[in-house]
Amino acid sequence: MYITVRNNDVSKAFRILKKKLLEEGVTKELRERRQFIGKAEKRRLAQKAGKKRWIKKRAQLEQQFIREERNQFRKNKNKRNQRNVQRPNQGSNQQNRSRPSSNKNFRKPRT
């Protein structure tokens, strides 16, 4: 692993080093190796970590569901607005359709 120091800015290079070590998990491994951890404690820690992951995942799924629901409302609203715009044109066409175009199909009322 290499980190270059630019413009004699050692503090920035040190922050970059810390970030890379954290991403690779070196600091976590060092912390774990400082003392012995038994099987039961490892299992408890694993369960705790799994629960934390599940809570995080559930929150993400809820957010996604809320976004999808909101998008569906927007789509339906847009469809309704488009229908309202088209209705006046359709109404005038329907009035024209109700009148017979020729006398052949026109039925005379009974007297």
Image (cartoon, grey):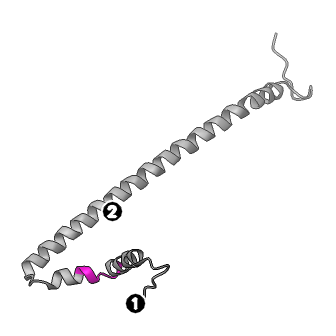
Q: Quick check: 56 above or below 25? A: above
Please identify the residue farthest to the right as the structure is shown: 103
| Residue at image coords 7%, 82% | 38
In this picture, which residue range is highlighted in magenta? 23-28
Q: Quadrant of the N terminus?
A: bottom left
Give, as a three-letter code, the residue at label 2.
Lys
In this view, which residue lies farthest toward the bottom? 1
Q: Nearer the viewer, residue 77 or 103?
A: 77
Residue that protrudes farthest toward the top in the picture: 111
Name the image quarter holding residue 94: top right
- Work out how far the residue at label 2 is from the one at label 1, CA to CA, in angstroms: 32 Å
- The front one of 26 and 10 is 10
Q: Quadrant of the C terminus?
A: top right
Within the magenta stretch, is there residue 24?
yes
Reply yes or no: does residue 106 show up in magenta: no
Q: Which residue position is annotated with label 1? A: 1
Q: Is residue 18 left or right of residue 29?
A: right
Q: Residue at x 78, y 30 (%)?
A: 89
Q: Which mark is residue 57?
A: 2
In percent of width and height, residue 20 lies at 37, 80
Q: Residue 110, how many percent across, how many down?
A: 81, 14
